[in-house]
Amino acid sequence: MALTDKFGRLITDLRVSVTDRCNFRCVYCRSANPETHRPSSELLAWEEYERLVRVLVGMGIRKVRITGGEPLVRPGVEGFIARLKALGIHDLSMTTNGYLLAERSDALVAAGINRINISLDSLDRHKFERITRTKTFDQVLAGIDRAQASKLRPVKVNAVLVRGFNDDEVEAFAAFARDRDLIVRFIEFMPLDQDHTWRRDIVVTGREVLDRIRALWPVVPVANSPSETARKYRFADGRGEIGLISPVSEPFCGHCSRLRLTADGKLRTCLFSKEDHDLRSLLRSGASDDEISGEILSIVAEKEPGHRINEPDFQPPSRTMVFIGG
Ligand code: SAM
């Protein structure tokens, strides 16, 4: 069975948010004020995730990324990864803030994770502390180093650039990629922050990042598949790679191959969907696998053509990144 939407896009990638909790409060994502988390009864149990993923794998999902919230704060995530591996998923990855990674990296590798993305938005300790509202800079760097010394090499480091906050660090991040022989991906700030501070003029475009890096080092494009979010470049004279993820200035929705499952069991067909689809109730009402896959087929058929960030009447979704799963 293939999962295809009405525009002919083939859906092969799933992002699974395993928690709505996070131990960071990044300014471009969450509010400084504590917000209430959903009670655990509202979150999917590991067996419920496993069943949904198994059904989705039967429908053509090939890549699964574990995210959150912060996925490493939910106990048992390594066991879940091992069970997904046993389903035959060959491309299993995780996005993490890296705080708990140094101590968990070996267990993640043993469980079967193939790749890891670590968020790091500043190489300056004080700025990092302002952005994340934590004092965890050393632990995150240790997490990156530990993962980079493992089978997860080359790790991807994700930096969201916000003008006036960290846009002065483009060149430093490129040098970081070269020094450590890893991949730094520059992500455009999207209107998904809880505080609604997003403005078009504080988005730092992928084009600007590429121009600034090219002014210092020659880079060579790296081939990618059309559904990949990043345009990739390696440094011509040596090690390291950069990726540009430009959903605002160069939307890639026409090739989107992704679905998202939230921690409370909602299926989302776009980060910016106006509605999500309640698979948790379906599961808990005793639906059969066939009923669940039938529902998923009809949800996917209606996947929206694009995110509409650049339309004059754009409204951000009511769920923000931490509740959707990035
Ligand atoms: N806690 C994990 C982490 O920090 O990577 C996973 C969840 S986090 C929501 C996933 C990704 O979303 C991170 O790379 C983060 O930087 C990104 N993100 C969050 N809010 C964003 C926004 N408004 N625009 C662009 N990216 C955002």
Image (cartoon, grey):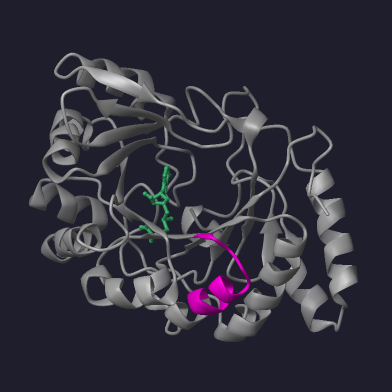
Q: Is residue 254 above or below residue 111?
A: above
Residue 89 shown in magenta: yes
Q: Residue at x 33, y 78 (%)?
A: 107
Tell me which corner region of the image, top left, top right, bottom left or bottom right, holds residue 297: bottom right
Residue range (magenta): 81-91
Q: Nearer the viewer, residue 312 or 89?
A: 89
Q: State the residue in front, 18 or 157.
A: 157
Residue 280, compared with residue 61, is above or below; it is below
Res. 205 in view: no
Label count reads 0
| Residue 164 vertical placement versus 236 (above, below) | below
Where 301 sits versus 99, above or below? Answer: above
In the rendered image, residue 222, in percent from the top left (x then y), is placed at 39, 27
Percent across and percent down for residue 234 are 28, 29
Location of the N terminus by quadrant is bottom right
Front-lying residue, 70 or 65: 65
Q: Residue at x 13, y 34 (%)?
A: 175
Q: Position of residue 277 (x, y in %)?
A: 76, 60
Residue 260 quadrant: bottom right
Residue 172 seen from this side: yes
Residue 226 coordinates in the image, percent (x, y): 57, 30
Whether 253 is among the magenta residues is no
